[in-house]
Amino acid sequence: MPEKVVIIGSGPAGWTAAIYAARANLQPLVFEGAITEENQIKGTLPLGQLNLTTEVENYPGFPEGDSREYLRTALPPAVQPYLAQANKPQPSPGINGPELMALMRQQAINFGTRVITEDILRVDLQRYPFILVPSDTADQAERPPVEALTVIIATGARANYLGLPSEDQFKNRGVSACAVCDGALPRFRNKPLVVVGGGDSAVEEATYLTKFASQVYMVHRRDELRASKIMQGRALANPKITMKWNRALQEVLGNESDGVTGARLASTVDKETEEVASSGVFLAIGHTPNTDFLRGQVELDKAGYIRWTVPQRTYTSVEGVFAAGDVADSYYRQAVTAAGTGCMAALDAERWLAARGEH
Ligand code: FAD
């Protein structure tokens, strides 16, 4: 019997899709990814990108502080009677990424989601039911293929890093690949910061960080930005942004107790190096969507992201195959938007099956 819904991927998009599909009685099967050294190096172990971070301060519903007190005081007295149900002790102030992901996974399982801790290696989406070929890490081989009536692809993307050992050493202690996620953290406030990159998103990240930082150094290998003219103008006119032209990040500097304290930059035109004091180093050199296993099967854009084919829907170029989260979204790249499109994909899959009389 083919599966009604197979979900590939285990970030906020995948688990939200699973929660909705399970509650719609579709008995979803999730391939959450394999625990392998290769996935560890790439940053694609199960539970997705949030499993690589610490505090998550912008996922709604998990404010830092005393949640019990918030529940008592958050609303004006006139509406407080409506809170009677919610006024239960809440043990955890705020949430971190790995906790949030473990809870999403559990929530999906509570509604009957089945989970396999393997990668999908190959797909055949030209056949129907669709064919998915999982890995078998134990046997270093392939498992028997799985047949599916609908597929939700939620394999996410991964931030690109330069590959310096010092980057790894200080990840979550000053090295970040997401200004919107981390910029407001106390360790970056009123401190000088470094942004590496020269495209539109590097300018966006640098501009965003100027809201918190005392100074932002933009480190770029060339003597002009790749960003669009309008973005270039914005960066160059910002008094808090200092361009470090013709420079590459050579090493992130820091120590055990303080994390990042600076960056050593190497000139790309001569042998000069310089050190700048900085509490954070933000990499803004792009992302790589996890779509290698889909090539030739579903339409991807130039950068390898899955193309959503209908506005406000999670449809892809293959009917019955839906995409959710960062794998199809190079623009917002947030946990809450990934979860939102995960919900949409499950509803789209359910309605698609219903229209065919298969659910
Ligand atoms: P992902 O989280 O990318 O997860 C997809 C997962 O699917 C992969 O990790 C892998 O385990 C699995 N997978 C991949 N390929 C396969 C395959 N072939 N077969 C099976 N499984 C596969 N966002 C916020 O909103 N707030 C934050 O504070 C925040 N902090 C961040 C900090 C860091 C360091 C990073 C890197 C990102 C952060 N983000 C944050 C962004 C957020 O994590 C992403 O937007 C979100 O996780 C995207 O979710 P997703 O479900 O699309 O996929």
Image (cartoon, rainbow, N blue to C red):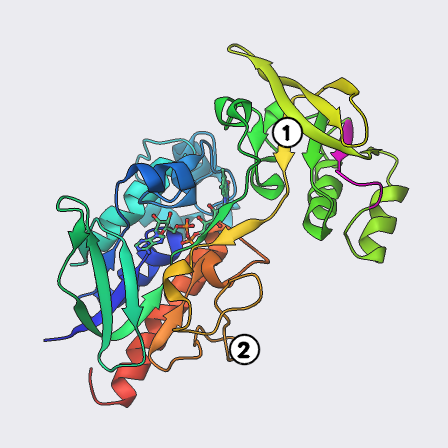
Above or below, 279 against 140 in this view is above
Residue 187 is drawn in which quadrant?
top right
Q: Which residue is found at the position 39% from the left and 37% from the top?
A: 41
- Residue type indicated by callout 1: Val
For the residue carrying disc 2, how many other residues have a C-alpha within 10 Å: few (<14), some (14-19), or many (20+)? few
First along the sequence among labels 1 and 2: 1
Residue reaching furthest to the left: 1
Q: Position of residue 12 (x, y in %)?
A: 38, 52
Rendered image: mark on residue 311? 2
Residue 268 is drawn in which quadrant?
top right
**Residue 218 part of the magenta-drawn span:** yes
Segment colored magenta: 215-224
Residue 220 is drawn in which quadrant?
top right
Secondary structure under tag 2 reads: loop
Is 207 situated left or right of 96 in this image? Answer: right
Rendered image: mark on residue 281? 1
Q: Position of residue 323 (x, y in %)?
A: 41, 67
Is 219 situated left or right of 72 in this image? Answer: right
Secondary structure under tag 1 reads: strand
Q: Which residue is found at the position 23% from the left and 47% from the top?
A: 106
User: Do we see residue 288 in this rendering?
Assistant: yes
User: Do we see residue 24 in this rendering?
Assistant: no
Ligand 1 is within 8 Å of the C-beta of the residue at disc 1: no
**Residue 310 part of the magenta-drawn span:** no
Structural distance between the alpha carbons of marks 1 and 2: 36 Å
Q: Quadrant of the C terminus?
A: bottom left
Q: Which residue is found at the position 71% from the left and 31% from the top?
A: 248
Q: Which residue is found at the position 34% from the left and 40% from the top?
A: 38
Q: Position of residue 66 (x, y in %)?
A: 43, 30
Q: Position of residue 28 (x, y in %)?
A: 21, 65
For the residue carrying disc 1, how many other residues have a C-alpha within 10 Å: few (<14), some (14-19), or many (20+)? many
